[in-house]
Structures are given as C-alpha cells and as structure tokens.
Image (cartoon, rainbow, N blue to C red):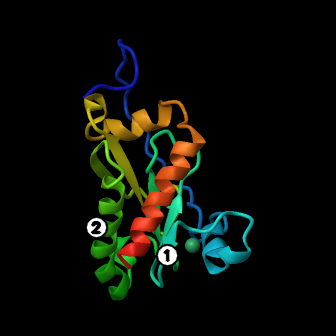
C-alpha cells in the first residue's frame, strides 16, 4: 500500500471539531436532495437514466471516472443510512450488492471490488463500488479511492463499455 503522493509527507494534527456539523445535501436545513427529483422522474430528466433499477434500487454512473466499472447504488427512496432503511430495502441490499459485485468482476482484470458507504456528502442512501485493477497493489485497501481521485480520466469508450456490460449483467440476473 502506498499513497499516491511522493514522500516526504508531513503528519498533520486533527482540526478542532465542528459541532454541530453543517447540514448535508438532503438533510433538514441543507440543500435540496436533487437525487430524489431525478429518481422520481429520470425518464424526463436531462441526466441519463440509471444503468439498472428496480423498485428499491438504482445503479448509477459516476462522473469523471478514472477506473472503468466504478458505479454507485442508491435507494429509490430517501433514507439516510443503514440504520434508517426499511426492512424491505435492508433485506434486498445484500442480494443486489452481490449482483453488482459479480457484474463488475465479470469485466475482467479486476482484483477486487471495494464497497464504500461514506454518506458524508449526501443524506440520500448510496454506496460506491470501486473496482481495484488487477495487479495495482499500491491501491489496496483505503488507498484505492485516493488513487481513483488522482488518476487521469479513463477513455470515454472504455467507461461506456464497462457500464454497458454491467447494465447487461444486471438485467440478465433480474
Ligand atoms: Zn433524496
């Protein structure tokens, strides 16, 4: 594991805590949840529709993708965290994540699929799927999102091809 930065790095002290924290997108007092708007009517949205969806979940494209196959999954309805998911969504979460992981792995040349839920930006439940390229040992564990942030954007055709394959695999296993 290595950071995507040259040495030497200087250790910083944690900043003073900010309490109360500023409201996130879709949280009371925060910016409006545009994700709710899009999910309610993506057929008529200016943004492209999800790669795949059912009554509970939508699998979505990312922007500025550096690793083809990087996608995110969101609940169709507004819930914040695992703690807030209704039972039906909580029960369907495991099977749908397994399907997404299998669809990404089937792209080939992927060592592992990392699944992240940060939830620090938007209060609408979503998880990220980061494929770790096979052999990219410096991007193991928590280094992968740092590398993914700093690597050059992948060719659009490669990103679109990976997304199309993932969408097809999800449709097949529905
Ligand atoms: Zn929302």
Number of other residues with Cα within 10 Å of mark 2, as a class: few under 14, some 14 to 19, many 20 or more? few
Q: Distance between the residues labelled 1 and 2?
A: 15 Å
> What residue is at 28 percent from the left and 67 percent from the top?
98
Q: Residue 53 carries which label?
A: 1
Q: State the residue in front, 22 or 54.
A: 54
Q: How many labels does the image show?
A: 2
Asked if residue 99 is positioned above or below residue 133 in the image, the reply reads: below
> What residue is at 53 percent from the left and 37 percent from the top?
154
Asked if residue 95 is positioned above or below residue 61 in the image, the reply reads: below
Is ligand 1 within 8 Å of the beta carbon of the residue shown at mark 2? no
Q: In which quarter of the image is the N terminus?
A: top left
Say which quarter of the image contains residue 44: bottom right
Q: Residue 98 carries which label?
A: 2
Q: Quick one: label 1 or label 2, which is nearer the N terminus?
A: 1
Q: Which mark is residue 14?
A: none
> What residue is at 31 percent from the left and 51 percent from the top?
114
Number of other residues with Cα within 10 Å of mark 1, as a class: few under 14, some 14 to 19, many 20 or more? many
> What residue is at 55 percent from the left and 51 percent from the top?
160
Q: State the residue in front, 34 or 99.
A: 99
Does residue 20 appear in the picture of this structure?
no
Q: Residue 33, how many percent across, how many down?
A: 63, 69
Q: Dot 2: what SS? A: helix
Q: In which quarter of the image is the C terminus?
A: bottom left
């Amino acid at each position: 594991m290595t950071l995507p930065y040259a040495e030497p790095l200087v250790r910083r002290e944690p900043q003073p805590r900010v309490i109360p924290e500023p409201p996130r997108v879709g949280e009371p007092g925060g910016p409006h949840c545009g994700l709710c708007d899009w999910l309610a009517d993506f057929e008529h949205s200016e943004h492209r529709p999800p790669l795949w969806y059912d009554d509970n979940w939508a699998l979505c494209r990312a922007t500025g993708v550096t690793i083809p196959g990087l996608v995110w999954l969101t609940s169709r309805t507004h819930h914040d965290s695992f703690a807030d998911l209704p039972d039906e969504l909580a029960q369907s979460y495991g099977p749908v994540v397994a399907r997404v992981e299998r669809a990404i792995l089937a792209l080939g040349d992927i060592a592992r699929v990392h699944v992240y839920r940060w939830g620090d930006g938007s209060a609408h439940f979503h998880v990220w799927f980061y494929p770790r390229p096979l052999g990219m040992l410096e991007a193991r564990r928590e280094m992968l999102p740092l590398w993914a942030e700093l690597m050059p954007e992948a060719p659009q055709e490669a990103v679109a091809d990976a997304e199309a394959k993932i969408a097809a695999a999800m449709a097949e296993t529905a």
